[in-house]
Amino acid sequence: MIKGNKDHAALADIFNQDEARVDWHDETLWFVRAKRDKAANTLSEWEALRENASQIKDNVLSNLHDYLSEFESNAQQNGVIVHWAADAAEHNQIVLSILKSKEISRMVKSKSMLTEECHLNEYLHQNGVEVIDTDLGERIVQLAEEPPSHIVLPCIHKKKEEIGELFHEHLGTPKGASDPQLLTAAARVHLREKFLTRRAAITGVNFAIAETGEFVVCTNEGNADMGAHLSEVHIACMGIEKIIPKRANLSVFLRLLARSATGQPITTYSSHFRTPRKGQEMHLILVDNGRTQQLGRADFRNSLKCIRCGACMNTCPVYRRSGGHSYHTAIAGPIGAILAPNLNMKQYADLPFASTLCGSCTNVCPVKINIHEQLYKWRQVIVKEGYADPKKTIAMKAMEFTLSHPYIYRNAGKSGRWVMKNMPFLVNNKLNAWYTQRDMPAPPQQSFREWYKKNNNE
Amino acid sequence: MSSRAQILACVKENQPALTVLPPDLTGLAQYPDPLAMFGSVLDGIGGMMYPVKDYEELIGLIKTKFSGLPRVISTIPELAELTEKDWQDLPPPSYEDVDVAIIKAHFGVAENAALWVTESLMGQRVIPFICQQLVVLVHKKIFYPICRKLINKFQIPIMVLVLSSPVLQRLPILSSH
């Protein structure tokens, strides 16, 4: 694919070198998917909830301008300082300027896919600000100097032995220790010190309620809350699509989110932030970064309904066997593959092709995003725009030429069968992409055309 | 043009034709005994439920369960004999060594074992997160089957916390007081 130097298939090949890890990754995510199914089956109204959530989000997208204005005005009345960022760069600058105005150079951050999308950590690091990720999985990948590979389970690609090695190196746990309880306890001690000494905290936002100006943050570890409640400055970052109209709509999403994500009945902590604590400053940054553009693409705007549960990843047969890093974007998997080309079609032209189009992602999506249809539509747009893999384009043109010239088609078939029979090494080699994952079939004695001619003329 | 104006203009230009908000769902799952359902879900996610009939029994339970833990705080006046005095106005980091925090919840939700807590019941926002053990007291009559519209009961929450799946050995307790 023409998109810089990254390619899903090539990156998946790297992941696939360790077959045992691929099997384990596949099984672990399928376990989560199965938990999701069990949780969904506990509610007879599950499908009605999905439909309701989808319609609420449709309403949000159709009235986003007014809801954003309403939310901003209510949040300001609550004492929250609201900022607007057109893109990732502006978002990062706003965060830095808030920190600079308070002379803060060390901070804690809870998991936020938006800040990953904006590469905030790198930006702050380059500007002399130390950022400690406080979600356990995020902290692990941060210590490993890697991006998260999953939006809900950021270090799902790492085995406990590898985490033990990282903790031994960075947190001083005994060499060879891999007991999850011991490692978690070590991380807890390490992170508590950071929580208690950092003056600023960044959190993401799961839902922002236009009616009240409050925002809701869902975590299982309570790390967003620890950071926010101990700090002098709380900065919350959200994409503009996170709005929901009323507080009464919230329960629909809270009931769907954790069940879809991990199979839990609800996230451990679902915190509503409305006003800053006495003596605290609360900032909220509303970020566009391509979202308004996606809103204008009728075929793809549904992707903005995403509530970031990760169900589509857990169920995707490609994601489970290729690993999150093969998607080379902050949000991996099926949903990432329809969001990323909106930001940069050339750079992410490979991603809509990283799918079997089986539709499993669409079937589990709690807000009914037509993910597999959008993947298919993106493929067409990408080919039309000229970003398709040149090898595939040439192959398709050659196929078109062959199929439209019967004489050439007949002879190509004949030569192909002869080569496969008499000189198999010419097709059974690494240059033949078809051969890398499959055995070549035994060549038939004759073509159908030859068989038909023979059997009908006698 | 400011980013705000630019974003809002672009949203207005790109948003599709207005669709209506769907009506609230009806005919949702009901649990004949919400309290029993709550206990069962809570058990499944690692919490423990202890029915107690009055404060006297609660105090006895706390003493038994948490004997030897020095720093116990609570926002419940009836538990004053067990807990630290005048703790509520300290700077948030000073609660780092709280062993047990005991707070009330407004209500519990059967389907997911969630407990609804507003800031007024926490004393300090950080309390439910920083303590080593959390005990949440909720009246056994205040249980609802599902979490729908309940949030609207609290028109002006400053900070609401929905607690579920207690971390470590946290201990929600029910009382009939």
Image: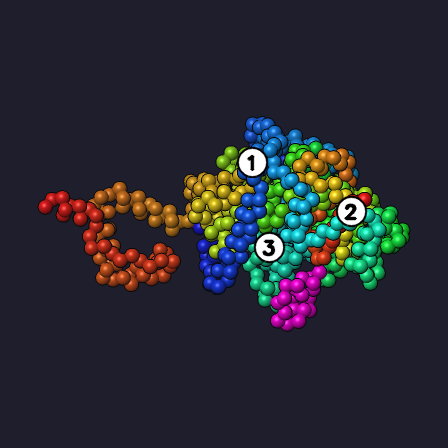
Question: x, y (%) of residue B176?
Answer: 78, 45
Mark nearest the camera among 1 and 2 is 2
Q: Dot 1 lies on which element? A: helix
Q: Position of residue A56 (x, y in %)?
A: 60, 34
For disc 3, the marked residue is A154
Callout 1 environment at 10 Å: few (<14), some (14 to 19), or many (20+)? some
Please rate how many residues cluster around mark 2, counting C-alpha atoms within 10 Å: few if below 14, some from 14 to 19, many from 20. Answer: some
Q: Is residue A59 left or right of residue A373?
A: right
Tag count: 3
Q: Chain of mark 2?
A: B
> Which residue is painted at 57% across and 61% down in the image?
A158
- From mark 1 to mark 2, how far is it between C-alphas? 35 Å
Identity of the amino acid at label 1?
Ala
The reply to whether callout 1 and callout 3 are in contact (CB within 8 Å) is no
Q: Position of residue A86 (x, y in %)?
A: 63, 40
From the image, tell me which residue sits under label 1: A48
Say if labels 3 and 2 share a chain. no
Going by the numbered disc 2, the residue's amino acid type is Ser
Q: Is residue A249 magenta?
A: no
Q: In this picture, is B119 found above or below B131?
A: above
- Chain ID for label 1? A
**Stretch of the chain drawn in magenta:** A166-188
User: Position of B9 compared to A458: left or right?
Assistant: right
Amino acid type, residue under disc 3 in the picture: Pro
| Residue sitting at x 54%, y 38% | A47
**Residue A226 visible (yes or no):** no
